[in-house]
Image: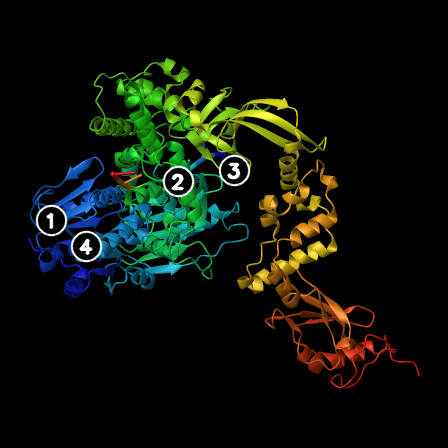
Amino acid sequence: MTPPAFPIDALLPRLLATLREHARLVLEAPPGAGKTTRVPPALLGEDWLGGRRILMLEPRRIAARAAAEFMAAQRGERVGETVGYRIRFESRVSAATRIEVVTEGILTRLIQDDPELAGIGAILFDEFHERHLHGDLGAALALDVQANLRPDLRLVVMSATLDGERVARWFDAPQLASEGRSFPVRLAHPPARAGEAFPERGWPFHLRRAVAQALAESEGDVLAFLPGRREIEQARAAIAAGDDLGAVHAAVDLVTLHGELSLAEQHAALAPASAGRRRVVLATNVAESSLTLPGVRAVVDLGLAREPRFDPNSGFTRLDTVAVSQASADQRAGRAGRLGPGACYRLWPQSRRLEPARTPEIAQVELSQLALELAAWGSDALRWLDAPPPGALAQARDLLRALGALDDDGRLGDFGRRVLTLGAQPRLAAAVLRAEPPMQPLACELVALIEARNPLRGESMRSDDFRLRVQALHAWRERDTAGARALGAEPAALAAIGQAADAWRRRLAGRTPATDRDTRRGGDPAHRESTAVGDLLMHAFPDRLARQDANDPRRYQLANGRGARLGDASALYGEPWLVVVDLRHEARDSLIYAAAPFDPQRLARDFPQRHRRERRVRWNRDTRAVEAFEELRFDAIVLERRVVPAAPEDALPALLAAIRELGLDVLPWTEHARELRLRVQSLRGWSPELELPDFSDAALLRDLEHWLAPYLNGKRRLDAVQAAEVSEALSSRLDYEQRRALDAQAPVAIGVPSGLERRIAYAADAPPVLAVKLQELFGLADTPRIADGRVPLTLHLLSPGGKPVQVTQDLRSFWERTYPEVKKELKGRYPKHPWPDDPWTATPTHRAKPRR
DNA sequence: CTCTCCCT
């Protein structure tokens, strides 16, 4: 059979010629160009490939399978012959395979296992614009391999829309672009009315009007993009209630589509509309790249998506609703142009500028897997398109140390290597590998449950007791489908989770001595009373072990120092200890979504190194006195506390803690000391080469031990600190050269033409100010400057009565333009002061006119 | 009013 022609075919000769000359290439081609299925076979006959294989990376399993099947069919073969694929738990390759389509985690494993990539001649990164974490890592590792071990290895980045210039610069490669194959899509921006801009209450009405317009102006189905399930439900209710859809309303089916739906429900959404009917599909991002809907001719786009943001300070990930990128908006609009010319209704003002591309995952997700891979690679010095943020990386390494996957030096130990190669996220891998053999089957089920979406529906889905999901899985495993349903579970979801759990067990059996006896417990409801689930999960979430607050039974103290609380309908109320699997981050106490109780006796047994017996001192705000305790703590959780007598050496740490709690303003500051801080901070900004110390509030509080502590020795009360001591403590941080530079470049005062010295006012975030009577500056054309002439003073020119007349950094133009006006205005009010017609030649003075 | 999409 002759392959159908694709737009990219015209480009293939140039692509082959370029790859003969260059080892790297960036190929930009929109959807429908045919890059995924046409480029790999075209490379097979190239001399540089020799007999070696081509790897192609796909970001989704479905896409990997489909691409391999399509290419195999084009050759009249079956998958696993010349063309094969490998995804997690599934491999269809043979010795004859020359094109191997893999998903992202597989590629990382392949490179880590054999950095020389023996037998591989080229790696193609498809859909690179999606910027998944593993895609970025895979590309960075491949570049490292090519630079150091395999200069002949060909690397090709393929993407739809990308910042081509920036990618080509990073990849240091020529760039080719192909036409796509899609129909034109007309763009419209139907305006919102007052109160209809998201997240105001009225946004569903804006959407409803746009849907009605789309139905009226287009044939076929309408696809609407919304950020999440909640918004889908709100939109559905608004559309169902409205009569704007008029005559067509009766012939329209409303369909919802999101990742939490069962397979059957997703299939219903993907099936074409029945004869004579039209569909309005309300969808999340699943419909942007993963699922293709037949029959869509119009798109309505709210322009929003939910994205995870990892906060290194709290250690939690939260889900934010954000404006989509321009690339994403274009991709969504393109969904209307697959069958014929289409229309897209964008529910944001046409004037709004979108970010060109979405933030890459590496910049905003939790990085423990990346950190583990880097430890295995043995080097952080990779060529990144976007480097991992240092804060998130440090936090990831802390977690890996808590899991036992990295040693104190940040190196990968034996356990860490096993965590890495198991192929689950590090938290879950650690829990499985720590499980005693009889508990391994249950541990594998927990991994499968946590990796999957919640299999429970309805009210059960809201339960925060993680054991309910385990119980439903066990009911299903024991063929008690009715029991599983009674727990609110969706059987198809449980079937998939059960299969995944079995796959983990098989993988684990290959690595550790097998225990064939199935000792699965907890099929019985008694399991819900037990701590078996929590006892395993504590090794996955050692930072989220939580103890009930003695004063507030709904509140918990987490080991990582944060607070959390149970929801109002919690099934876990009254549990003294919980391991928190999932929570929603909030500034004060995060909300617990899923947790399980564990046996607190395990703390001492399993985590002895995290217990600390410590003497702690505190400054009591009410009694204004120093208090001392002896505490036994598990990380941030206080297990025991008893008051002990305060000793003289307790005073200093307590005073420092008090200053940190109450802020720097509890110290007595002289005007001179305040001014010194502002001068130093200003000059630090103008002359970084002086390396002046940081005098900001944050830095001074952080460094109290260095600068203030020596002056607190022997003191037991805060009010014993003298203002002069604070000043001296501050200025002693400057050495002789720095003090000289400060006096020369950021002086306290400056001489003005009247012969007097006038003070300069420094500020934290504003230019320095010189307030002076304008008569004192007669004859002066240039604005006075400090910091070796680099910084002009902002002049506050005053009337003889000290009232501000003008603020300027341009004295010359004041005399020329503004002074005549000012003179006219003020001469009558201050007749005793000089108001010469020519300020350039008048004598500067701060006094009134001499008496005759 | 409890949460987008993926992947080893």
Residues tagged by mark 4 and mark 3 found on one chain of the structure: yes
Residue that carries the numbered disc 4 in the rendered image: A150
Label 2 to label 3: alpha-carbon separation = 23 Å
Front of the two marks 1 and 4: 4
Residue that carries the numbered disc 3 in the rendered image: A586
The residue furthest front is A736
Would you say B1 lies left or right of A461 here?
right
Residue sitting nearer the eye, A375 or A350: A375
* Three-letter amino acid code at the position of disc 3: Glu
Pointer 3 and pointer 1: residues touching (CB < 8 Å)? no
N-term-proximal mark, 2 vs 1: 1
Q: Residue at x 73, y 72 (%)?
A: A751
Q: Where A486 sits versus A669, above or below?
A: above
Q: Is mark 4 on a helix, strand or loop?
A: loop
Front of the two marks 2 and 3: 2
Label 4 to label 2: alpha-carbon separation = 30 Å
Residue that carries the numbered disc 1 in the rendered image: A98
N-term-proximal mark, 4 vs 3: 4
Pointer 2 and pointer 3: residues touching (CB < 8 Å)? no
Q: Is mark 3 on a helix, strand or loop?
A: loop
Q: Can residue A796 be seen in the rendering of this structure?
A: yes
Q: Can residue A307 be seen in the rendering of this structure?
A: no
Task: Please rate how many residues cluster around mark 2, counting C-alpha atoms within 10 Å: few if below 14, some from 14 to 19, many from 20.
Answer: many
Residue that carries the numbered disc 2 in the rendered image: A397
Instruction: Name the subunit of mark 4.
Output: A
N-term-proximal mark, 2 vs 3: 2
